[in-house]
Each structure stands twice: as C-alpha cells, then as structure tokens.
Amino acid sequence: MTQILQLDGLSKAFGAVTVADSLSYTLKEGEALGVLGPNGAGKTSMFNLITGTLQPNSGHITFAGEDITSRSAAHRSRSGIARSFQVPQPFTHMTVFENAMVAATQSAGLRGHEAERLCIDVLEQTELLDKANDRAGGLTLLNRKRLELTRALCAKPRLLLLDEIAGGLTEAECTSLIATIKSIHASGVSIIWIEHVVHALMAVVERLIVIDFGRKIAEGEPKAIMDSPEVQAIYLGIEADV
Ligand SMILES: Nc1ncnc2c1ncn2[C@@H]1O[C@H](COP(=O)(O)OP(=O)(O)OP(=O)(O)O)[C@@H](O)[C@H]1O
C-alpha cells in the first residue's frame, strides 16, 4: 500500500488553546483510521487543517505525494479530499438529487450525464436513491447523515473525512450506517473517521489514534488502544460502549 496522507509536526494554537501539538501520522491508501479524543481535543480542527480551512502555525501536510500545506481548500478538494460535517449542512430547500449534483458539478467538476450518472451511483451506494426527489430539509437524521456522505462521495474523493457521523442515531440506524461506511471503505476510498460512538469505529477501522489537547497520545491496533490504561483514563466519563 502506498501512503496517501502524511501529517508532519503539525501545530496550531488559538491564543492559549492548542488544537494541534506537533501532530504527526501517516495514512496508507485504502486504509481506514479512527480518531478518538475528548470534547475540545482538537479533532475537528485537525480536519480543518487537512482540508485547508485552517492554516497551521507550523508543520506540513502531504497528500498523494504533494505538499499541500499552503494550497487552498479548493485545490485540496479537487485533489480528492472530501469531508462530512458534524452537523449536516445540506441545501435544505433543494432535493436530495440537487444536493448531490452540486457536489458532482462544483467539487468533482463533472457536467451533464456524467454528473447525473455519478449522483445515481452514489445515491445507490448511500441508500438514498428512493429519496432522490425529496427535499433535503425534510429528511430524517439518518438520511441527513446519508446525504452528508452522498455530498462528500459526489466529489469523487480519494480521502474521506468523517466527523462524528454516527452521533445521535439509534442502534439500528447506526448498524445500517456502519454497513454503508464499510462498503465505501471496501470500494478503496481512504477514510479518517472521528467518532465518539466507539463500537461503530471498531467495526470499520484498522487503526486508531487518540488525541488529547491537540497531541497524539496513542496510536495502534484498535483493541489494544481501547485496552490501554491511559486511553481508558481519558475516556472515564465518556460513553465508550465497546
Ligand atoms: N476558530 C477558533 N477560534 C478559537 N478557538 C477555537 C476555534 N476553533 C476551535 N477552537 C477551540 O479549539 C478547541 C478544539 O476544538 P475542536 O472543535 O477542534 O475540538 P474537537 O476535538 O473536535 O471537539 P468535539 O469532540 O467537541 O467536536 C476548542 O476549545 C474550541 O473551542
């Protein structure tokens, strides 16, 4: 497997609040990496640094062999980095299909039939095809999460960043979403998944990292990481339903 992403000594602070503290790790192409950490640890900020909506104070990010540290968010999106947001951000007045088309045309740069074909294929994969003509604003929470996935996948990403996509779902809904994420992973897309619903992460990822105060405090095979006393101490008080 070749390497798709490398974070190298990435640091970022907002005044006294450090959100990334010499953060370094690599992701292999096709790998699924889980990210755990308490609230406010800097996990979403890490995604903002990777997607380019936040600039680091120091350090480097390499994606698909290119140093993208100074590249714009638009360039990174065109290069194949897509994300879902913690709070789904669809165009609520538009249909599910129209939302998908915005991503296929604006992010993937497709036109006409090619864009429509991609949207249909992705909506099939995210199990939203039967809702294609529904208004996004009227979707259930699970389907709003599925639409987040759809919009990200319509950008044709090589790297998909998932930010707490399983939060707020019932057990049955979570199981159904896990199956979809597994199918995305099986299709070869590299994934970094921030999630508090630990059993969802454990069902998909091959490796876990734990972040606290912007620092990587643990990294390795998921079960070994969850069994480690340091991680358990950090997770005391947090619902870690493994
Ligand atoms: N633009 C900003 N300006 C100032 N402080 C910020 C900014 N963005 C984030 N922060 C602060 O940085 C810290 C880390 O935030 P971040 O959202 O990255 O954490 P997180 O690990 O994703 O948390 P959660 O699990 O609650 O989503 C928080 O204390 C947050 O208030």
Image (spheres, rainbow, N blue to C red):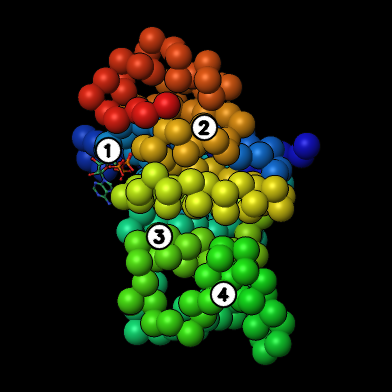
What's under tag 1, amino acid-wise?
Gly
Q: Residue 168 carries which label?
A: none
Please give left or right for residue 138 compared with residue 181 in the image: left
Q: From the viewer's perspective, is residue 217 above or below residue 200?
A: above
Q: How crowded is mark 4: few (under 14 residues within 10 Å), some or many (20 or more)?
A: some
CA gap between label 3 and label 1 equals 25 Å
For image coordinates 58% across by 71% down, the residue present is 123
Disc 3, SS: helix
Tag count: 4
For image coordinates 48% across by 85% down, the residue present is 133
Compare marks 1 and 4 and give the one earlier in the sequence: 1
Q: Residue 40 carries which label?
A: 1
Q: In the displayed image of the protein, which residue is found farthest to the top?
A: 229
Residue that mark 2 sits on: 202
Q: In the displayed image of the protein, which residue is found farthest to the bottom?
A: 112
Whether residue 221 is visible here, answered yes or no, is yes
Q: How crowded is mark 1: few (under 14 residues within 10 Å), some or many (20 or more)?
A: some
Residue 55 vs residue 83, the one in the foreground: 83
What's under tag 2, amino acid-wise?
Met
CA gap between label 1 and label 2 equals 22 Å
Q: Position of residue 122 (x, y in %)?
A: 62, 68
Residue that mark 3 sits on: 142
CA gap between label 1 and label 4 equals 36 Å
Compare marks 2 and 3 and give the one earlier in the sequence: 3
For image coordinates 52% across by 20% down, the residue present is 223
